[in-house]
Image (cartoon, rainbow, N blue to C red):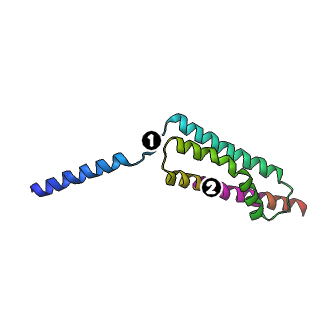
Amino acid sequence: MRRVLALCLWTIAASAGAAADEWQESALKAATLEKVYQIANQYQRCMVKELQSQVGSDQDSRALTDSILKKCEPQLSPMRDVFTAEKVPAEMAERYLKKTRTQAARNLIREVMAMQAQRGLMTQ
């Protein structure tokens, strides 16, 4: 019985010690989160602006999406700087940036294809 109790206490103590070393999402300040949201908003606005400038383009939807994403990529570098300043582990910051890029690419390709389909219907 004592061994089981000792094992349980040791397990709880070990998990508490490990949890103290891990980065917690709630560790980011509200001001930091606001900066991240502002940067993400600027990234979205860049993509909308670039998409609007390409309305009449006959480029393939994938190539057009890729060119827009490449033009707006520099908008995300301040986000990496914010994460670095807050001592967010690089792996987690990169994962968040990758998620942001992936979501943007999916939404953008959808918009580009819809725009091209609508233009195709109007020319018929």
* Image quadrant where one finds the N terminus: bottom left
The type of residue carrying mark 2 is: Gln
Label 1 packing within 10 angstroms: few (<14), some (14-19), many (20+):
few
Q: Is residue 74 magenta?
A: no
* Image quadrant where one finds the C terminus: bottom right
Q: Earlier in the sequence, mark 1 or mark 2?
A: 1
Q: Residue furthest top?
A: 31
Q: Position of residue 48 (x, y in %)?
A: 75, 48
Q: Position of residue 120 (x, y in %)?
A: 85, 62
Q: Which residue is mark 2?
A: 103
43 lies left or right of 63: left
**What residue is rendered at 42% in x and 47% in y?**
23
Q: Secondary structure at mark 1?
A: helix
Q: Nearer the viewer, residue 68 or 89?
A: 89
Q: Position of residue 44 (x, y in %)?
A: 69, 47
**Front position among marks 1 and 2:** 1
**What residue is rendered at 54% in x and 39% in y?**
33
Q: Nearer the viewer, residue 82 or 42?
A: 82
Q: Position of residue 112 (x, y in %)?
A: 76, 58
